[in-house]
Image (cartoon, rainbow, N blue to C red):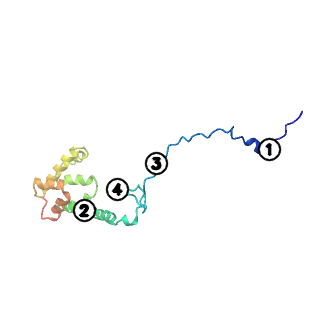
C-alpha cells in the first residue's frame, strides 16, 4: 500500500483561472444621490424639523414662554375674580360665602337662594336638561336681585362680567 504524497494546503486551495466560476452580478438597484443639505446644517426654511431635533439658537425666541405664563396668569386672575364674586353674591343672599366653593353643595345653596326645590340638583346631571336648568336658575337669581331676564341670560352666558357686577354693584337681594 502506497500512500499519496501530501500536497500543501495552498496548492489545494488555489485553482486555475479556467476552473474559477465568474462572479455573480449584483442584484442591487442604483442608489439615488442624497438631497442637498444647506451648509449651515439647519433644515431648509420650508420644512419643519423633526420632533426632538435641536433648533439653531438664532431661531429661538422667548415669546412662547412669556405667552404661556401670561395666559396662565390671566386665567388665574379670572378664577380668583369669579370665586370672590360668587362669595360676595352668596353673602348678599344671606348665605355663608364659603358655601359657593363646595361642588354640588353650592348648587343646593344656589337653589335655596332662588327658592326652588333641592331635587333640581338631579336635573343638573342630565345632558341638555342641565343647560335649560342653568338658564332658568340664573334668570331666577337675577330676578331675586331685582334684575331682568336679560341680566339673567348675561349671568349664564357671560358670568365673568355679570357676576362681578352683581356682587360689587348696588343690587340688593329681595
Q: Determine whether the residue tagged by mark 3 lies in a helix, strand or loop.
A: loop
Residue 52 percent location from the top left of the image:
43, 57
Please give the residue where the numbered disc 1 appears in the rendered image: 8
Please give the residue where the numbered disc 4 appears in the rendered image: 46
**Which of pointers 1 and 2 indicates the residue nearer the eye?**
1
Q: Determine whether the residue tagged by mark 4 lies in a helix, strand or loop.
A: loop
Which numbered disc flags the more N-terminal residue, 4 or 1? 1
Which of the 4 image quarters holds residue 59? bottom left
**Mark 4 in CB contact with mark 2 (< 8 angstroms):** no
Q: Determine whether the residue tagged by mark 1 lies in a helix, strand or loop.
A: loop
* Real-space CA distance between mark 4 and mark 1, rounded to the nearest whole angstrom: 67 Å
Q: Which mark is residue 78?
A: 2
Taking depth in this image into account, of 125 and 23 the one nearest to the observer is 23
**Mark 1 in CB contact with mark 3 (< 8 angstroms):** no
Q: Say if 112 sits above or below 128 in the image.
A: below
Q: Determine whether the residue tagged by mark 2 lies in a helix, strand or loop.
A: helix
Residue 172 percent location from the top left of the image:
12, 62
Which of the 4 image quarters holds residue 86? bottom left
Amino acid at each position: 500500500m502506497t500512500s499519496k504524497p501530501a500536497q500543501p494546503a495552498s496548492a489545494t486551495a488555489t485553482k486555475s483561472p479556467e476552473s474559477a466560476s465568474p462572479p455573480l452580478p449584483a442584484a442591487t438597484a442604483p442608489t439615488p444621490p442624497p438631497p442637498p443639505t444647506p451648509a449651515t446644517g439647519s433644515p431648509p426654511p420650508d420644512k419643519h424639523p423633526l420632533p426632538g431635533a435641536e433648533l439653531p439658537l438664532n431661531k429661538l425666541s422667548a415669546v412662547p414662554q412669556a405667552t404661556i405664563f401670561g395666559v396662565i396668569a390671566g386665567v388665574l386672575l379670572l378664577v380668583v375674580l369669579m370665586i370672590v364674586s360668587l362669595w360676595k353674591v352668596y353673602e348678599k343672599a344671606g348665605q355663608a360665602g364659603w358655601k359657593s366653593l363646595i361642588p354640588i353643595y353650592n348648587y343646593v345653596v344656589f337653589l335655596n337662594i332662588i327658592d326652588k326645590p333641592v331635587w333640581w340638583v338631579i336635573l343638573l346631571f342630565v345632558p341638555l336638561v342641565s343647560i335649560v336648568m342653568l338658564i332658568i336658575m340664573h334668570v331666577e337669581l337675577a330676578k331675586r336681585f331685582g334684575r331682568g331676564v336679560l341680566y339673567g341670560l348675561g349671568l349664564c352666558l357671560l358670568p365673568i362680567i355679570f357676576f362681578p357686577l352683581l356682587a360689587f354693584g348696588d343690587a340688593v337681594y329681595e
